[in-house]
Amino acid sequence: MLGQFVSRAEAKASHAARSAAIGLGAGIALCVGLFFWTLAAWLFLLTVTSSMVAALIIGCIYSGGGLIGFAIISSRGRKTPPAPVQRNPEPQVGLDALVAAFMKGAQAGSRVKSPPPQATDRS
């Protein structure tokens, strides 16, 4: 029983570690890709405009994206999660049901015949 619990815990920990490693690698690759996209945009904007305007455009794009991301996160945080639905609510037992159960038990007990008394030997 304990061995099964430990093996499940080890399997879950191993799965979580693999997921974290894959996520870290994906995050690093995304950052490198974002760097090269930014560099490509910078070089393109330098051919069209001055370096000051190119810096302003790229800064505004990143700042706007960050503000939109924060707005999405803050709007998601305000929503209240729905209340959990109770599948099988326990019935409420009132005083009437309790008294009726007691009377039914008392009637069943009164119907039971008691055993005959034991004869005592007086010799």
Image (cartoon, rainbow, N blue to C red):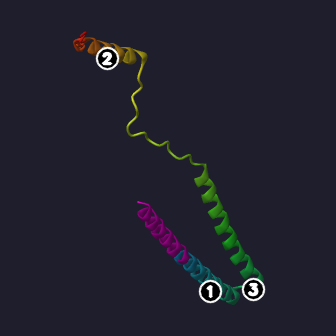
Q: Residue at x 51, y 69 (%)?
A: 13
Q: 10 Å neighbourhood of mark 3: few (<14), some, or many (≥20)?
A: few
Q: Residue at x 24, y 10 (%)?
A: 123
User: Residue 21 at x, y = what percent?
Assistant: 54, 77
Distance of label 3 from label 1 (alpha carbons): 20 Å
User: Dot 1 corresponds to which residue?
Assistant: 36
Q: Quadrant of residue 89?
A: top left
SS at badge 3? loop
Q: Residue at x 34, y 18 (%)?
A: 101
Dividing the image into 4 quarters, which one contains the N terminus? bottom left
User: Residue 59 at x, y = what percent?
Assistant: 72, 75
User: Residue 82 at x, y = what percent?
Assistant: 50, 44
Q: 10 Å neighbourhood of mark 1: few (<14), some, or many (≥20)?
A: few
Marks 3/1 in contact by CB < 8 Å: the verdict is no
Give me the disc on residue 105: 2
Q: Which residues are magenta?
A: 1-21
> Which one is closest to the eye, mark 3 or mark 1?
1
Q: Amino acid at mark 2?
A: Gly
User: Residue 80 at x, y = what percent?
Assistant: 56, 46
State whether residue 82 is above or below residue 50.
above
Q: Nearer the viewer, residue 46 or 40?
A: 40
Q: Is residue 66 left or right of residue 22?
A: right
SS at badge 2? helix
> Which one is closest to the eye, mark 3 or mark 2?
2
Main secondary structure found in the magenta portion: helix
